[in-house]
Amino acid sequence: MKKLLSILLTGLLILSCMALGVSAYSDPANGDWSQKSVVLKNTSEAELSVRVGDIDACNDENAISDGGYDPFTAKSQYAHGYPWAKDDSDPAGTDRIFVGSKWSGESNDGYSSNYSYYKSGDDTENAYGDGALKLVMEYDVSDITVKNVILQLCIDDFQATSTDSNFTVTLNGKDAPFIAELLNHTDQTGPTAYIVSAIIPSGFFDAVRSGKLTVVIDETTGVGDGYAIDFAKLLINYNDKVFTGKFSGTTEPGATVRLLGTSTTVTASSTGGFTFNAIPGINAVRASKNGFVENYDSGIVLSSGTEWEANVSLDEGKGSPDIDFSQFGVTSGEENNNGDPSTSTPAGNGTGTQNDPSNTGKKTCPICHFCSQPLGLCIFIWLLIILVVIIIIVIIIVAVRKKRKDKK
């Protein structure tokens, strides 16, 4: 009887660990974080969500369990170690240190310094990539009408504003300067990974509809700014609810302010104030006005609360033209709220065809995120309840038998 009780207790412990493990490493919008490639339909974020690369802060096995790594909250992130051991099963372009196809051998940061050891043959154990970073996302979109698209990159150690590096981005071979601009006005400190988001213009929808989207990121100056991508996500027919963050800022009164990665602009108020709704992660803005030189600022926007307040001062002078988004097609719907120039509507607001799983009649399990919920409880909870009941019954039976034996 004692042996049976020990087995039951062990089973209870194992199931408890399984429940905790699943809840910590998966969620309905992203699936199992350890999976290298995931395609999900009708999530809370989009009609189709495609992820390439696992979510692990560049192969750091302690990032989630010990460091609380969660790039979707955009809180101050866990600083992972580097360089990291290579995993040949990682999809091309993910979890590897790159320096770009034009690298001259110069080292301006820790990543590029480690990369030089790789190129000299002194480091054969860690994860590096040659040439430009290339990601390939494959999926079936034959039953979907593409209406809007967001590309998210979980970037690591991009430092263009401090190293004077210059990144280019192409989608299926076509130049995507609206993504490159976002990377070129970002300055990450420390080995940390954050999400940046770019709305894909309609001029790229044919590439999206092909079912195979190839993203190439290259550094063109050769200055030695090492960089990496933890994972990438494609949200097709996204829900406006992905814009859960908000930030405000100040600039020259009446200036035009654009959220980088989109064509969405607002006009600063008479006191220079402006506000944007945004996707949590690293966000950047561009401010411009006739008679002034344009300027940029970037910062971290949280999923709740506001940590970043943009401050974009403008100096008098001759500015440069903004990106001509007309050549790429429309990237957003209405560009401000009810004519109020100090606030913005998320680009593409109101055009998504997202189907929320909560409206399908099937509840999403808050513990494991995928199992059914008989009578409203997760299968794991029911198993735990059953085990507890069995253990109680066994204990009662043992006690009764012992009592009878004592009477004899």
Image (tube, rainbow, N blue to C red):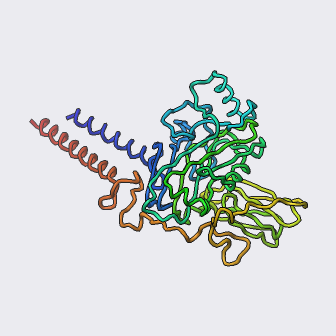
Q: Is residue 358 above or below residue 393?
A: below
Task: Specify the farthest residue to the left.
Answer: 408
Give 367 or 212, whichever is nearer the viewer: 212
Q: Is residue 380 visible?
A: yes
Give 6 or 197, whichever is nearer the viewer: 197
Task: Specify the farthest residue to the top.
Answer: 122
Task: Specify the farthest residue to the right.
Answer: 316
Q: Is residue 64 above or below residue 39?
A: above
Name the residue rendered at 44%, 47% in the picture.
32
Q: Quadrant location of the C terminus? A: top left
Residue 357 on image: x %, y %: 42, 63
Name the residue rendered at 50%, 55% in the picture.
210
Number of numbered discs visible in the structure rendering: 0
Give 78 or 290, whichever is nearer the viewer: 290
Q: Quadrant location of the N terminus? A: top left
- State left or right for residue 325 relative to residue 94: right
- State left or right for residue 242 relative to residue 327: left
Q: Is residue 391 above or below residue 197?
A: above
Residue 324 on image: x %, y %: 73, 63
- State left or right for residue 165 relative to residue 128: right
Name the residue rendered at 55%, 59% in the picture.
206
Residue 240 on image: x %, y %: 56, 66
Residue 291 on image: x %, y %: 89, 65
Name the residue rendered at 62%, 36% in the picture.
97
Q: Is residue 313 visible?
A: no
